[in-house]
Image (spheres, rainbow, N blue to C red):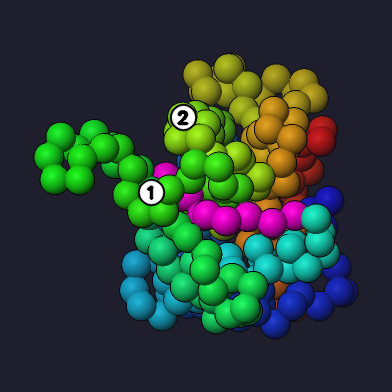
Amino acid sequence: MASSSNELLPAWKSELISLCLGSGILTFGSFTLKSKRVSPYFVNCGLFSRARLIRAISQAYALTLDAHAKTTPEWSFDVLFGPAYKGIPLAATTAEKLAGVDEQKWGDMGYSFNRKEVKDHGEGGLMVGESMKGKKVVIIDDVITAGTAIREAIDIIKAQGGELVGIVVAIDRQEKMPSASEKEGKGDDGLPRGSAIGEVKRETGVPVLAVLTLTDLIQAMQQMGRGEEVKQMEEYYAKYKPTD
């Protein structure tokens, strides 16, 4: 549930959110989303484009994956798959950061990404990097909106002979999927619906992890004394909270 809390965030989450604020990655105001909803906050993951920023987000992905592996001993993976284009630098930099978190466990972690168009010369083919054949694969991407891009990535993994075992994204907005009427600009119909992440979890049966959630953002803003932002995000969540 997205709500303010007196519970302290892990230091790395607080530091990441502060960095996002200072770099304009996390901003507050009035933002019309693709769904036509008007959000009081926006996270522009495309701005993780400078050295210290990509270092911070890739470290956060690595800590998220490592933490899940520690709390779920039966869960493991061999390859990070970064769907073109945004997933490509995330896969490469997160694989390196995983090795730094635990060299013995993650030092041989592979990464792979796809081309948008099949290369017909040189080494050729659709894929670049580690083979996924017969291996356990985690998809790494920035967000899940309607889930279309994730489903395309899953199809690629299956075609390459890999086994999907997890998905990790930067942000979980913790809101229900938009209705057809919303996409047409006619407003929310008020009917119960799950979130995009919840829908992907049900379809795939694998864990879907998020580096940051709306709950995290609310807690961070509360701890910074930014009550107006907290109020706006809580009101937005109350209006669009998912049923899952």
Query: Does residue 56 belong to the magenta stretch?
Result: no
What type is the residue that disc 1 sits on? Answer: Phe
Image coordinates of residue 137 in percent, x first then y, are 57, 48
Mark 1 lies on residue: 113
Residue 93 screen position, x and y as percent: 43, 68
Q: Which residue is mark 2?
A: 159
Task: Name above or below for residue 139 compared with residue 160.
Answer: below
**Which residue: 45% across, 57% down?**
111
Quarter residue 89 falls in: bottom left
Classify mark 2: helix, strand or loop: helix
Q: Is 201 on the left or on the right of 50, as rendered?
A: right
Tell me which residue sits at (77%, 21%) in the image. Answer: 191
For residue 72, which numbered disc appears in the image?
none
Give the camera-side residue of 107 and 184. 107
Q: Residues within 10 Å of mark 2 (few under 14, many from 20)?
A: few
x 81%, y 36%: residue: 244
* Residue type, mark 2 in image: Ala
Q: Is residue 214 visible?
A: no
Among the two numbered marks 1 and 2 on one chain, the one whose residue lies closer to the N terminus: 1
- Image coords of residue 214 (percent x, y): 69, 56
Q: Residues within 10 Å of mark 1 (few under 14, many from 20)?
A: many
Q: Which residues are magenta?
A: 75-84
Residue 212 placement, left or right of 48: right
* Cα gap from disc 1 to disc 2, whole angstroms: 13 Å
Secondary structure mainly formed by the magenta segment: loop
Q: Is residue 109 above or below residue 103?
A: above
Drawn side of residue 181 relative to residue 75, left or right:
left
Q: Looking at the rendering, which quadrant does residue 23 occupy?
A: bottom left
Front-lying residue, 220 or 200: 200
Front position among marks 1 and 2: 2
Task: Name the residue nearer the viewer: 212 or 68.
Answer: 68
